[in-house]
Image (cartoon, rainbow, N blue to C red):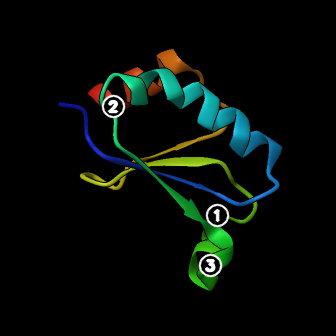
Amino acid sequence: MPPECQLFGTLGCHLCEVAEAVLMPLVEHGLMVELVDIAEREADYETYGLRIPVLRRTDTGAELDWPFDTDQVVLFLSG
């Protein structure tokens, strides 16, 4: 079972939409991804404002910064 993840982004972010599209095939195969809008919490905005989109594993806290493709996400999740 793949680990659960969070995708940090915000509305109107084109790269965040692209990142979601990259993740969709994995979501269709059981990956759980929570979309986190960094505009909702000041701490998230300060941490991720210049980095979004960022994929974060909830089990280890490891983060994968954009740009990433499906193969990189699979490798990130298996590590």
Disc 1 from disc 3: Cα separation: 12 Å
Q: Position of residue 54 (x, y in %)?
A: 58, 49
Residue at (61%, 65%) from the top-left corner?
Answer: 37
Front position among marks 3 and 2: 3
Q: Crowdedness of circle 3 by 10 Å Cα count: few (<14), some, many (20+)?
A: few
Above or below: residue 15 compared with residue 7: above
Residue at (65%, 48%) from the top-left corner?
Answer: 53
Residue at (59%, 26%) from the top-left corner?
Answer: 22
Above or below: residue 56 compared with residue 2: below
Is residue 60 left or right of 19 when viewed as pictured?
left
Is residue 6 left or right of 31 when viewed as pictured?
right
Q: Earlier in the sequence, mark 2 or mark 1?
A: 1
Above or below: residue 35 compared with residue 38: above
Q: Earlier in the sequence, mark 1 or mark 3?
A: 3
Q: Which residue is at the far top?
A: 71
Residue topped by disc 2: 77
Q: Crowdedness of circle 1 by 10 Å Cα count: few (<14), some, many (20+)?
A: some
Secondary structure, mark 1, is helix
Q: Earlier in the sequence, mark 3 or mark 2?
A: 3
Secondary structure, mark 3, is helix
Amino acid at pointer 3: Glu
Residue topped by disc 3: 40
Quarter of the N terminus within the rendering = top left
User: Who is closer to the viewer here, 56 or 4?
Assistant: 4
Amino acid at pointer 2: Leu
Secondary structure, mark 2, is helix
Q: Crowdedness of circle 2 by 10 Å Cα count: few (<14), some, many (20+)?
A: some
Q: Which mark is residue 35?
A: none
Q: Position of residue 68 (x, y in %)?
A: 61, 28
Residue topped by disc 1: 48
Amino acid at pointer 1: Tyr
Disc 2 from disc 1: Cα separation: 20 Å
